Image (cartoon, coloured by chain):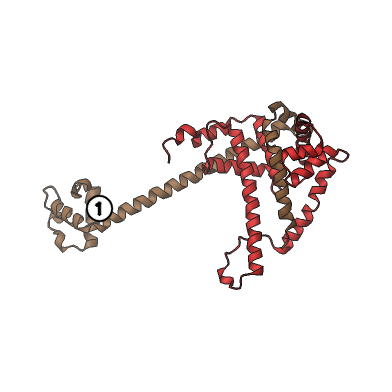
Chain colours: A red, B brown
């Protein structure tokens, strides 16, 4: 352990105290973050707890100059991306398995993943998530451009240009999109 | 192999990334009012999450205590094994102890050279418990 660490990062006890002092708004903010990242069948509140578990387990340190809420929010984001990476790795391994390797003993064993049937069910359940998202913004072209553009990875400046909004208008519209999605999830919409 | 759900997950994560900063920058009042407008009970939700966290902390502490206990037990076992292995020290300490005044006649009539290693260790431990042998001194 680095001698400087206690000075720059919270101890586990300090982190636990920081979390115990969360206000209602802090908890709800984290839940809203998790709502955006908890893609079906993950439950947002479970995702928050998972992030808190990892935080107090100490695998990642909370710098003193970062708010504990932000630290946990970043942990939620990190979990989502890790899970995504795992799924992509599984897919890569399946591809190698099917096409090029003849020696089956040499293949890295895959993690137990969903069966073909489970994947079909999952795909069925998730079908048209993007369309359902767009339907939330029926009649609002600017909001739909933001959703579509963001889903396809279009960056901020380019996206703003497509919408034809100035920076303030764009920020305001994006906030509206975020609120609308959080509100829809609150009422049963799943990603 | 096409996995539509996997592609979709990546797209949805991009969307979440784009909206993340706005959520972090929103004021507390905005966050509370958003939940209320969506029909959520802010206090009830927060209380539930807080309780879940407290339960998580208790579980984590239990796990840490279990791990510490297991570690201590392992260290004790290792120490006990080390004591058993050092038979020459035990035999020498027992010889000295048996020559002392104040022991019972039966004890003094025994000589450590007649005893097996197992008997030496048993008597050595017995005399430590009785305070006749000081293990710290017998190490030297």
Position of residue A15 relative to residue B86, above or below, is above
Residue marked by disc 1: B125
On the image, which quarter does residue A174 sit in? top right
In this image, A181 relative to A26: left or right? right
Q: Quadrant of the N terminus of chain B?
A: bottom right
Q: Nearer the viewer, residue B105 or B96?
A: B96
> Who's the residue at 82% across and 46% down the image?
A132
In this image, B59 relative to B110: left or right? right
> Who's the residue at 13% across and 59% down the image?
B111
Residue A42 x, y percent position in the rendering: 69, 48
Question: What secondary structure is marked by label 1?
Answer: helix
On the image, which quarter does residue B116 sit in? bottom left
In this image, B14 relative to B104: left or right? right
In this image, A19 relative to B20: left or right? left
Residue B27 x, y percent position in the rendering: 69, 27
Furthest-right residue in view?
Answer: A139
Furthest-bottom residue in view?
Answer: A102
């Amino acid at each position: 352990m680095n001698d400087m660490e206690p000075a720059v990062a919270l101890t586990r006890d300090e982190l636990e105290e920081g979390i115990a002092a969360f206000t209602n708004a802090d908890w709800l903010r984290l839940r809203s973050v998790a709502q955006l990242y908890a893609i079906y069948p993950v439950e947002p509140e479970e995702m928050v707890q998972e992030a808190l578990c990892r935080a107090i387990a100490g695998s990642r340190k909370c710098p003193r100059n970062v708010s504990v809420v932000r630290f946990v929010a970043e942990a939620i984001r990190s979990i989502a991306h890790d899970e995504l990476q795992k799924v992509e790795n599984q897919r890569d391994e399946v591809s190698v398995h099917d096409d090029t390797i003849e020696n089956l003993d040499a293949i890295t064993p895959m993690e137990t993943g969903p069966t073909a049937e489970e994947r079909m069910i999952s795909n069925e359940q998730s079908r048209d998530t993007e369309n359902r998202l767009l339907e939330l913004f029926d009649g609002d072209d600017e909001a739909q451009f933001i959703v579509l553009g963001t889903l396809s990875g279009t960056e901020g400046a380019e996206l703003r240009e497509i919408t034809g909004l100035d920076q303030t208008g764009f920020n305001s519209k994006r906030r509206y999109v975020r609120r609308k999605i959080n509100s829809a999830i609150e009422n049963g919409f799943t990603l | 192999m096409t996995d539509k759900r996997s592609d979709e997950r990546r797209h949805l994560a991009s969307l979440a990334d784009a909206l993340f900063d706005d959520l972090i920058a929103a004021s507390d009042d905005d966050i509370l009012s958003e939940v209320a407008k969506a029909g959520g009970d802010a206090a009830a939700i927060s209380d539930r999450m807080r309780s879940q966290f407290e339960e998580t902390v208790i579980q984590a502490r239990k796990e840490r205590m279990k791990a510490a206990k297991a570690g201590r037990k392992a260290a004790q076992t290792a120490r006990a094994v080390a004591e058993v292995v050092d038979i020459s020290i035990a035999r020498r300490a027992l010889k000295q102890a048996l020559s002392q005044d104040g022991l019972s006649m039966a004890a003094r009539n025994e000589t450590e050279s007649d005893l097996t290693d197992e008997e030496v260790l048993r008597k050595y431990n017995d005399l430590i418990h009785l305070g006749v042998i000081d293990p710290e001194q017998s190490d030297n």
